[in-house]
Image: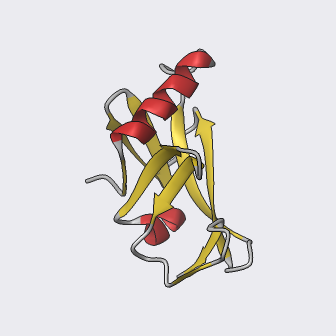
Amino acid sequence: MAIVSLTSAAAERVRDLLDRDGKLGSHGLRLKVVGGGCSGLQYQLGFDDQVSDQDSEYKTGEVRVIVDDRSAVYLAGSTLDYLDTLQESGFKVENPNATSTCGCGESFGA
């Protein structure tokens, strides 16, 4: 079962970025929760080709998703979306575990 689901828009954007960089076959999207931000925790997204014993890995279409075990506790049941509108642009995490968020939406508390 996926820890984080990706909307079709998010999966397509990640696939496009990986393909643009020639990393579609070798890298996956790593989602991580780290300390920081005004609410205490923040999301970190990046591309990674390393998977350790402390990671969960699964595929969404052509995209590999990698989440470490510590982050999985905070991310379980979340959805990653990609928005490209006049008001918002970028990846957005809908997290049912977040008990509070900061005004800018960059960090959360759990």
Q: Position of residue 56 (x, y in %)?
A: 42, 51
Residue 20 figure quarter: top right
* Number of numbered labels in the structure image: 0
- At a point 68% along the width and 79% down the height, the residue shown is 40
Residue 22 figure quarter: top right
Asked if residue 26 is positioned above or below residue 35 in the image, the reply reads above
Q: Position of residue 46 (x, y in %)?
A: 63, 42
Colour scheme of this structure image?
Answer: secondary structure
- At a point 43% along the width and 77% down the height, the residue shown is 97
User: In the image, is 55 to the left or to the right of 22?
Assistant: left
Q: Position of residue 23 (x, y in %)?
A: 57, 20
- At a point 49% along the width and 77% down the height, the residue shown is 98
Q: Nearer the viewer, residue 98 or 75?
A: 98
Residue 50 figure quarter: top right
Q: Nearer the viewer, residue 86 or 8?
A: 86
- At a point 61% along the width and 48% down the height, the residue shown is 45
Which residue, as the protein is rendered here, is positioned at the far left?
A: 1
User: In the image, is 61 to the left or to the right of 85?
Assistant: left
Asked if residue 106 is positioned above or below residue 18 in the image, the reply reads below
Q: Position of residue 48 (x, y in %)?
A: 60, 36
Q: Nearer the viewer, residue 4 or 79?
A: 79
